[in-house]
Image (tube, grey):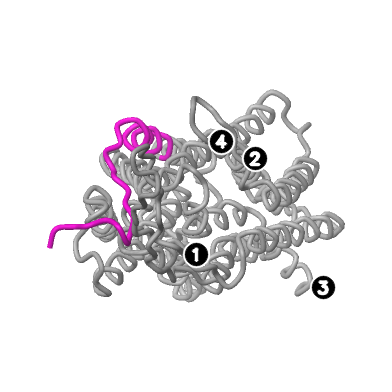
Amino acid sequence: MSLYIHILACAFGLGSWVAINGLWVELPLIVNVLPEAWDLPSYLTVIIQLANLGPLIVTIAHKLCPGRLRENVVICVVLTIGVLVCILLTVFWRNTTVFLGAQRSTAFFVLTFFLALVDCTSSVTFLPFMMQLPAKYITTYFIGEGLSGFVPGLVALGQGVGMFKCVNVSQTLSNLSQPGDESFVVETQYLPPNFSIEVFFSLLVVMMVVSLVAFALLNRVPRTYELSTECLVHKSGPVNSMSGGLDNPALSDPNPETKTQEDDVKDQSRPLVVKPFYSCCELAFIYFMVVWMNGATNGLLPSVQTYSCMPYGNMAYHLSAALASVANPLACIIAMFAPKRSLVFLGVLCLLGTGFGGFNMAMAAMSPCPLMQGSPVGEAIIVLSWVFFTGLLSYVKVMVGVILRDQSHNALVWCGAAVQLGSLVGSLIMFPLVNIYHLFQSGDFCSTKCPL
């Protein structure tokens, strides 16, 4: 029975962010089809931020009607919408309409908004539901949540993309004196992948259905509610948060002089003492890192990933998107088994990740002629730069969350606010730079001539 519930919890967690993660790793193929082309990621970052309306509504409902909002009903509706939207995406993702005199991917944008609404809402509904089960299944749920980025990345790698050929395309000149004249233009033609975009979206439908079925079965599992130790202690006692006492032995015994020899033997098996509280300057540094990292990873850099990678070829873009998606959960797993709370260490990692991000941004600014274009070394460097950028900052984000969890509940609330602030500001900064001022230039791999 225990293994059965572990499998269900993992499958349930898979549906948390699998739709948006899958959409993102498929962009190397989508940008070659939809009219927005290389500008498409900048639109998606803003749309995803607008979808935070879902968590906001759920949070307000909890505040106005405490105890009346049932997570299981909300989750069922959310996952059902996710399945239906993925099905519609499979059929209508290519459909465009004319808006402001230009072709726009209206269907794709609307469906992406609802997928983002589903995934953002899962952040505030899935975990409270899992809290009704024994604590040992929470870790399994987080493993499934990590797989929501890992599995689409592996599927995208198996899909394969990047093979292209340069062909001469004839164009008839509109000249009345010489109506038969033709000119030839070199264009890039991409060869089809191992399976189509529609098949990939169909796989997303299957994963969402698996998550919905797993939730339905978990909802039938008998609940085991555990009493919190906080209600068994007098309110005036020197007890901090429950999580702080579990993870921080310095907080678990307010009077160390009363320890017996038996207690000393038990302490030898306890984890190392961690710093219980941080100064205002240290907390300001932590929140600054949260705002900056989420602004970079959720807004600034994703908006220009096409400009950073596509000049090196579609294969470089494909690998950077897929491997970065895989690097995120791997970094979270490393953080679980090798946690480092030192702010100096985390600051150095944040600085290194920022350096890789700066290199990616510089290559995007130099588009369509970045450094070492057309070289296998250049392609390898840009792919590795995106992987290290994502992996390093993902590790720091996890450890910062662990640190703030041990501070207080309010610290986590402010952490969530800082995450949303950074993501929103990053997206809003990049959107006009890409789509209005056109500071980043696209190009064609075959026809673009760059200086040596």
Q: Is residue 394 above or below residue 164?
A: above
Indicate which disc, 4 or 1, sits on the residue closer to the N terminus.
4
Check the picture and name the quadrant holding the C terminus: bottom left
Q: Quadrant of residue 343?
A: bottom left
Q: CA distance from mark 4 to mark 3?
A: 36 Å
Q: Residue 9: where, in percent of width, then height?
A: 71, 63
Q: CA distance from mark 1 to mark 3?
A: 27 Å
Instruction: Mark 1 and mark 3 in contact? Answer it, CB < 8 Å.
Output: no
Residue type, label 4: Asn
Report the disc number at residue 114. 2
Q: Is residue 214 left or right of residue 104?
A: right
The residue to which callout 3 is attached is: 1
Of the two numbered discs 1 and 2 in the rendering, the one whose residue sits closer to the viewer? 2
Instruction: Tell me the residue at 26%/53% (across/down).
Output: 368
Label 3: how many Cα within 10 Å (few below 14, some 14–19, many 20+): few
Instruction: Mark 2 and mark 4 in contact? Answer it, CB < 8 Å.
Output: no
Check the picture and name the quadrant holding the N terminus: bottom right
Q: Residue 359: where, in percent of width, then height?
A: 23, 56
Report the disc number at residue 329. 1
Q: Residue 353: where, in percent of width, then height?
A: 29, 58
SS assignment at label 4: loop
